[in-house]
Image (cartoon, rainbow, N blue to C red):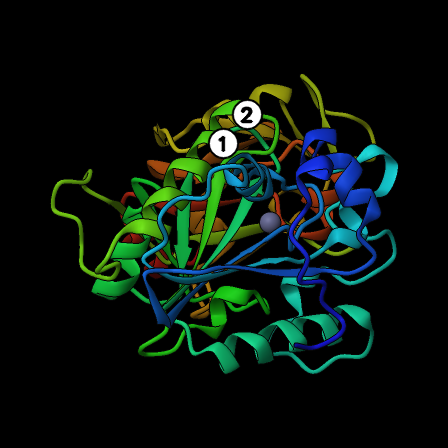
Amino acid sequence: MNPRFSTQWPTEAQWQRGLMEWLNQQDRPCWLSWPGRDPGRHRVVVTLLHGNEPSGLKALWSMMPNPPDCAVTTHFCIANVDAARLEGGFVHRCRPGRADLNRCFGRAGVGPEYELAAAIEERIRALAPEAVVDLHNTSGSGPSFAVTIADTPEHTALAGRFTERMLHTRVRLGALMELSLPGCPVITIECGGAMDPASDEVARAGLVRFLSDDPLLLEDKGAWPLDRLKDPIRVQLAPGRAIGYGNGAIADHDLVLPPYIERMNFGWLDAGTPLGWLGPLGLKALRVSDGIGRPEVGALFYADEGLLRLRSPSKLFMITTNPRIALSDCLFYMVTAQPEAASRASD
Ligand SMILES: [Zn+2]
C-alpha cells in the first residue's frame, strides 16, 4: 500500500473518544478495508474529498462497532483529513489557499492535491472495483441527490441505493466521478446539507445498501423511482464580480440573493420568479455553462427593474449562501422545464 495512506482502523478506545479526536490524530488520508463474503471482488467508498462535508465519514464512524455484512471487500478512502481537522473540524472545503481536491482528478497540475488525487485514482484502478461511490454534502441546506457523467442502468442502480434524484451532467471539472468507466461506474452522492442531521442518515442507510446488496448494479425495482435531471446548467458570477446576501440591492454588488434562497432547492419555480437583485452590470455579471456549449444567459433569465427573474419554469439546486463557495465554485445549478427552448433562445 502506498505509504501516503494510513490503513489503521480506530481502536475501540479511540472510537469511544470520538471522531474529532481520532481525526486530529491522523497525519495522512486513510484507506481502510472491510472484508466481504466474496473477497475477490471490490467496492470503493470515497468521502471527505471536501473537508467540510462530513456525512459520509460520520456514517462510516457510526457503523464501526458493528460493521454490516459486506457482500464484497469494501474499501474506504477518507481523503481530505488535512482540511477537515482545521479550526475545530469540518469547517474548510479545502486547506485555505490550496486547490480543491475534487477538481484535481484526471487533470495535470502541480501540488499536493493533484498528487493525492492521482494516488487515489491509482489505488482505485489497482483494485478494479465493481463500483465507486463518493459521498459529499451540499454547502446549503437541501435534499440528497446523485451526480453522474453517464445515464446507464449501472449508474442508475447505484444512485438508487442512496437517493431518489439523479443529475446527469456533461460539465467536466476534474471531479472523482469523471473517472467512471464501462465496468466501473463512479458516482457522486450529495447527501444533503452538511448541517442537516437527515444527511447523515441518507449516508448511513445508503452505505448499508451499497455494502450489503448483491448484485449491486441491477436496479432495485422495490426502490423509489428516480427523478432524472439532464444537463444541469452551472450558474456562476463572472470573475471579479461581488455577491451579497440580503433583502435588497447592495451598492457595488453584482448580485444579491435573499438569505432564504436555499429553500428554493429542488422545487419547480414559475417563470418570472424573482431570484435576487442585480447590480449595474445586470445579466452581464452572470456566466452559465452546461458542458455542451449552450445556453445563453438571456435564455434562462431576464432583468426586470433590477430584479433577476427566471425566463421559464426552472428547478434550482446546490444553492449556497456561503459567499466564498458561491464565488469559487458556483451560485447554483438549474434545469428548465423547456431545455430545448432555452438552448434555441439567444436574446
Ligand atoms: Zn463536495
Q: Is residue 108 above or below residue 324?
A: below
Image: 21 above or below 79: above
Residue ranking furthest to the front: 12
- Distance between the alpha carbons at the discs numbered 1 and 2: 6 Å
Above/below status of 23 relative to 30: above
Where is residue 117 shown, x and y percent of the image? 66, 71
Give me the residue at 70% from left, 77% from top.
Answer: 2
- Whether residue 340 is visible here, answered yes or no, is no
Q: Nearer the viewer, residue 89 or 213?
A: 213
Residue 211: where, in percent of width, then height? 37, 52
Residue topped by disc 1: 199
Secondary element under disc 2, as helix, strand or loop, is: loop
Q: Which mark is residue 139?
A: none
Q: Quadrant of the C terminus?
A: bottom left
**Is residue 213 at least partly visible in the picture?**
yes
Image coordinates of residue 336 in percent, x first then y, are 34, 45
Whether tag 1 and tag 2 are in contact, CB under 8 A, the answer is yes
* Extreme residue in the left direction: 221
Task: Tell me the quarter of the image containing the N terminus.
Answer: bottom right
Left or right of residue 80: residue 169: left
Q: Residue at label 2?
A: 196
Instruction: For label 2, count other residues whose C-alpha is less than 10 Å away and answer few (under 14), some (14-19) or many (20+).
Output: some
Spot occupied by residue 300 in the image (x, y as percentages of width and height): 44, 46
Give me the residue at 53% from left, 29% from top. Answer: 275
Amino acid type at mark 1: Ser
On screen, residue 243 above or below 346? above
Q: Is mark 1 within 8 Å of ligand 1?
A: no
- Estimate how packed mark 1 is, as few (under 14), some (14 to 19) or many (20 or more) residues with alpha carbons within 10 Å: many
Counting the numbered discs, the total is 2
**Left or right of residue 170, residue 283 in this image:** right
Q: Secondary structure at mark 1?
A: helix
Viewer-proximal residue among 242 and 69: 69
